[in-house]
Amino acid sequence: MPAKRLRLRSYVFTLIAVLLLIPAGAKAQTGGVTMKSTVSETVALSVVPNSTQSNVVADVMSSGNTVQITLSGAATDAAVIRVPLLVRSNSSFKISAAVESNTAAVAQLSVTDARATGTLVSPHAVSALNVPRQFDVRGLDESTSPALNLLDNSRPVLVVSGPRVSLGGTLASPNNALQITLLIRLHPQPAHGSSIHLTFAATAESLVQ
């Protein structure tokens, strides 16, 4: 009886080890039995802590795949805000932006830079990044970039999309994110000040192995 129990435990541990070693999306067939393992498509969006630069008060909140930025305070001159977004994903992704304001607040929204934060970022994350032409000023003189009134309503607008970013790690790893720097230029606001809400939302697309 003890020998049978030992053999049974050995079979159980072997099965567990096999299941853990099967890569995501792979198939293993033994004696006509097919085992499948899948991984949920995940994309997370956040902002580098204490890095948002602006001459107005900026309140940044990250939650899962969404970053919300609230800007408040009077600015007689056009305010310029730089926001370094961090994207982590195990699939291709896209990021949209929307604004809520009582005034025509956003004069320009541009992607100024994109870079990998470490060795666990896919080598294609930067080179295959897709930024619509009206938002792409990478490598250009930002001061001569045209003012674009494309976010003066609450309808989301596609800002950037790309392939899988993270090759491993967790949602808090320092070396598996793509950092995308956004430049947001606002129209001069009334003397009494106003509140502007910007929302950036990321969604996952088909899983890329």
Image (cartoon, rainbow, N blue to C red):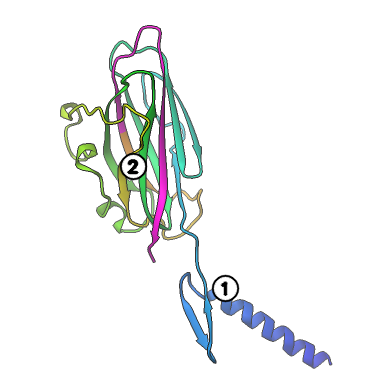
Q: Split into 4 quadrants, where in the image is the C terminus?
A: bottom left
Q: Residue at x 51, y 54 (%)?
A: 170
> Eyeballing the image, is 15 above or below 123?
below
Q: Which residue is mark 1?
A: 20
Q: Residue at x 41, y 53 (%)?
A: 204
> Eyeballing the image, is 17 above or below 121?
below
Give the amino acid type for the residue marked by disc 1 in the picture. Answer: Leu
Query: Quarter of the image holding residue 104?
Result: top left
Q: Are marks 2 and 1 in contact (CB under 8 Å)?
A: no
Whole-percent x, y for residue 74 in the image: 38, 12
Q: Is residue 152 left or right of residue 148?
A: right
Q: Residue at x 49, y 37 (%)?
A: 62
Whole-percent x, y for residue 41 in the image: 46, 58
Q: Secondary structure at mark 1?
A: helix
Q: Which residue is mark 2?
A: 180
Q: Residue at x 43, y 50 (%)?
A: 88
